[in-house]
Image (cartoon, rainbow, N blue to C red):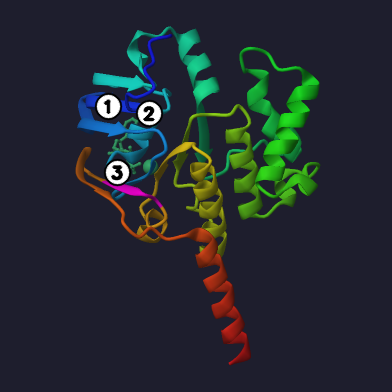
Amino acid sequence: MSTQTSNSPLVQLRSVTKTYTMGEVEVRAVRGVTLNIDRGEFVAIMGASGSGKSTLMNILGCLDRPTSGTYTLDGVAVADLSRKELAKLRNNKLGFVFQNFSLLARTSALENVELPMFYSYPLVSLRAQRQRAMQALDKVGLGDRYRYHSSQLSGGQQQRIAIARALVNRPQLVLADEPTGNLDTRTSAEVMGLFQELNESGITVIMVTHELDIAAYCKRQVVMRDGSVVSDTQKENRRIAIQEVDRLDHEKQKAKLA
Ligand code: ADP
Ligand code: MG
């Protein structure tokens, strides 16, 4: 696993396909995607429901293997790795954020954030785990809520906990599948502000969304249709989340006074 060249793209997909076979029926979810993503990018993967976005993300996250084609992550050909090596790579290099937050219920925010470190290699001492989890919680602005259970937190707060959990092993790449899908406009803008901040700190972010408003915060937009990439554009004037939060608050204030 030591073949990485830091000037090669972080993510390289070559003619990647994924076909699900369900009895007699074949579903060609991804149909030949070739894509490079460099370190420091912030990419939105867009497209209608069923266009193959989540399937592609599962491949990028090494949660699923392509039917054909190759995936190279940080210079490593993912297909060549054993299950154990794959688990290690996932744990050390990748962070995951999901639409439904995927936090453990009846478990504190702190313990949720500590969880990925139980599987990390080399092992992290319990004291260092606690310290790192607290740092991650501080980073997402929820250091004071570390004892709270998920059910005691708002949707936006739960997603911020999930982001802290994704960060705790210091990933190079964060993969987020519809992370604002269950959040209102202002909370979405706040969460996007967090992703923009992470990205500014050097973490590469790939985010699935079917909302144009959300994709507007990203630096690059890749659109899928029927399992293929149909457009791939760099955004010149991307939306800045902290400005958007201010604007929304200002509008609300104005509406109150009117
Ligand atoms: P999106 O995330 O863009 O909505 P998906 O990647 O979830 O799209 O799905 C793409 C296509 O693959 C859809 O037709 C879906 O029904 C199918 N599909 C996704 N996952 C599976 C699976 N595990 N088994 C069979 N078909 C699947
Ligand atoms: Mg999906």
For the C terminus, which image quadrant? bottom right
- Which three-letter amino acid code belongs to the residue tagged 2? Leu
Which residue appears at 67% of the width and 38% of the height?
136
Residue 222 appears in the rendering: yes
Discs 3, 1 touching: Cβ within 8 Å: no
Mark 2, residue position: 60
Q: Which of 211/249 is in front?
A: 249
In the image, residue 212 above or below residue 103: below
Rate crowding at label 2 as few (under 14), some (14 to 19) or many (20 or more) other CA atoms within 10 Å: many
Mark 1, residue position: 13
Q: How would you classify the magenta stretch by its main secondary structure?
A: strand
Ligand 1 position by quadrant:
top left
Residue 225 belongs to magenta span = no
Mark 3, residue position: 50
Image side of residue 95 versus residue 164, left or right: left
- Which three-letter amino acid code belongs to the residue tagged 3? Gly
Disc 3 is placed on an element classified as loop
Q: Which residues are magenta?
A: 218-222
Residue 256 location (% of width, % of height) = 62, 86
Q: How many marks?
A: 3
Q: Which of 44/10 is in front?
A: 10
Discs 1, 2 touching: Cβ within 8 Å: yes
| The residue carrying mark 3 has its beta carbon less than 8 Å from ligand 1 | yes
Residue 39 location (% of width, % of height) = 40, 33
Disc 2 is placed on an element classified as helix
Residue 135 location (% of width, % of height) = 72, 37
Q: CA distance from mark 3 to mark 1?
A: 20 Å
